[in-house]
Amino acid sequence: MAMHMMDVAQNSIRADAKNIYINFFEDCDNNILLFSVEDDGKGMSDEELSRLEDPFFTTRTTRKVGLGIPFLKMTCEQSGGSFTVKSEDGVGTTVEATFRTDNPDCLPVGDIAGYLTMLLVANPDIRIRFSYKINNEEFTLDNAELREQEIELQQPGMAGVIKAFIKDNLEELYSNRKVKSFLC
Amino acid sequence: MREIKTLADLKKKQEEMRSRIKLRDNAENPESLVQVKVAMATCGIASGAKEVMEYFVDELDKRSIRAIVTQTGCMGYCYAEPTVEITLPGQDPIVFGYVTVKKAGDIIEHYIKEGELVDGIIPQNYNTIKS
């Protein structure tokens, strides 16, 4: 799951996004995980959008396949979830995937802390807001807010600290899960 | 390690780090920074680019080498992932393929520190894509 997060966020970065919102929402009562990435990048035209799920479509010139999106679609659909992309040319793109967390084919969450840390450390110029919500409990991290507090992510030695920060908070959040799911 | 839960904890930690680092910060000069770009597209992620990138961030910090580590899109060498592009100050970028954590250690030790080339260079005949 964390790998998909990085993959989709990388798409947003490539679309020259200035703001990226990453949201996870676990609805424990209905066994659903909603994962979405919203950006204000350059968006896609209808034609590009219609070919998006084709693994042999890519805007790159260096290779012929583009597997990121088809891959995400496959993993969420194999768990019984659904997948949608909304995009407007010049406005931005929203990718939304739902997973059924009671399905054994649902992906484990993976190393969210590690990937998020790398995303934050490597992209100081992009505002990234991350939110993980389980029922009514929420953990959010916004690098604009960190900047206001004068916390510099690029300072040497900070990567480990920020990773520990995310990890500790997520672990506390995970303890709120009421039912067992295949996410962990 | 003590748990880090709030932004205040984070800030305190930053102060600690800063006081530890001050000593070696004197020689700072933006042009002298080493640039490390790790390919982070589907192919790179699947091959473990994150572990390599974490290693670069940690290790360069540990050795007090001032460097900028960023992520980039796929460079078209999916067969050789994880790939890393390194630009030493004043030199052309060089792309290394099959960079495991062990290989990353070699690259830091030999290429970044000494300027000696190590195995696994992908010959370059392209212009870097702006990601």
Image: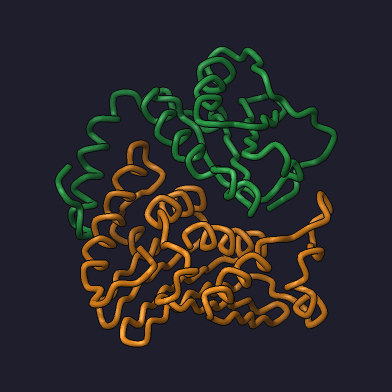
Nearer to us in this view, B76 or B20: B76
Q: How is the image coloured?
A: by chain
User: Quick one: which residue is furthest to the left in this view?
Assistant: B2
What residue do we see at 27% from left, 54% from top? A165
Above or below: residue A98 compared with residue A65: below
Q: Quadrant of residue A145?
A: bottom left
Label the green chain with its letter.
B
Residue A85 x/y as whole percent: 64, 80
Label the orange chain with its letter.
A
What residue do we see at 37% from left, 87% from top? A30
Q: Quadrant of the N terminus of chain B?
A: top left
Residue A184 x/y as whole percent: 35, 62
Nearer to us in this view, A86 or B127: A86
Above or below: residue B101 compared with residue B41: above
User: Quick one: which residue is furthest to the bottom in this view?
Assistant: A30
What residue do we see at 26% from left, 82% from top? A136
Answer with left or right where residue A61 lies relative to residue B113. Answer: right
User: Quick one: which residue is furthest to the front in this view?
Assistant: A104
Nearer to us in this view, A27 or A42: A27
What residue do we see at 85% from left, 34% from top? B125
Q: Quadrant of residue B34?
A: top right
Q: Give the total number of marks visible in the rendering.
A: 0
Residue A162 x/y as whole percent: 32, 50
Answer with left or right where residue A93 lies relative to residue A4. Answer: right
Nearer to us in this view, B52 or B31: B52
